[in-house]
Amino acid sequence: MPPVVDMTMPMSNYLAGLRQRIGNDLLLVPSVTAIIYDEHQRILLVRHVESDVWVAPGGSVEPQESPADAVVREAWEETGLLVEPLCIQGVYAGPEFLVTYANGDRVSYVMTVFECAVRQGELRPDGQETLELAFMRRPS
């Protein structure tokens, strides 16, 4: 049984339109994650507004958007940083990426993880999706 996630992140118009048609049925959703390191090799994590969970910045790929463009957009929206994707660290999917949201929506994510370099911008939470940002060390 997939975990139930008690959060209602902003949904794109595209996904909202699909949800109007299919209800809570399972959707396969392409997504991206940005791995951003600082000069001390710590990873940037964001604390989400609704779930109070710390994760790397990222989100869904929109129609007609490449995953590389999506990771740039998501990093900008959530962190205020303009990033450049350097390489793909991996693509992940499977049972551990199946999420049931508190409203009953079921999503199976296919996540492309990019290592990214910061090109410009100033670190700031957006206040809608992210409350706090911090560079953190990997667990030993």
Image (spheres, helix red, strand yellow):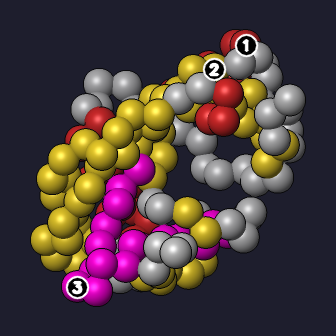
> Where does the magenta region start and end?
33-49
Q: Is mark 1 on a helix, strand or loop?
A: helix
Measured as percent of width and height from the top left, residue 42 is found at 37, 79
- Which dot, 3 or 2, sits closer to the camera? 3
Question: For mark 3, what is the residue?
Answer: 39
| Figure check: 5 above or below 90 | below
Picture residue at 74% right of the left edge, 63% below the top: 51
Secondary structure found at label 2:
strand
- Residue 1 lies, in percent from the top left, at 86, 29
Q: Earlier in the sequence, mark 1 or mark 3?
A: 1
Whether residue 32 is situated above or below residue 130 in the rendered picture: above
Mark toward the viewer: 1 or 3? 3
Q: Is residue 126 visible?
A: no
CA separation, marks 1 and 3? 46 Å
Q: In this view, does 17 lie to the left or right of 86?
A: right
User: What residue is shown at x 68% (from left), y 66% (from top)?
Assistant: 53
User: 19 or 78, which is in the foreground?
Assistant: 78
Q: Closer to the N terminus: mark 3 or mark 2? A: 2
The crowd level at tag 2 (other Cα within 10 Å; few <14, some 14-19, many 20+) is some
Q: Do the residues labelled 1 and 3 touch (CB within 8 Å)?
A: no
Looking at the picture, does residue 38 appear above or below residue 67? below
Residue 114 is situated, as x and y percent measured from the top left of the image, at: 29, 49
Q: Which amino acid does label 3 sit on?
A: Glu
Q: In the shown orientation, is residue 135 left or right of residue 96?
A: left
Please name the amino acid that badge 2 sits on.
Leu
Q: Residue 27 carries which label?
A: 2
Task: Read off the residue under disc 1.
Answer: 22
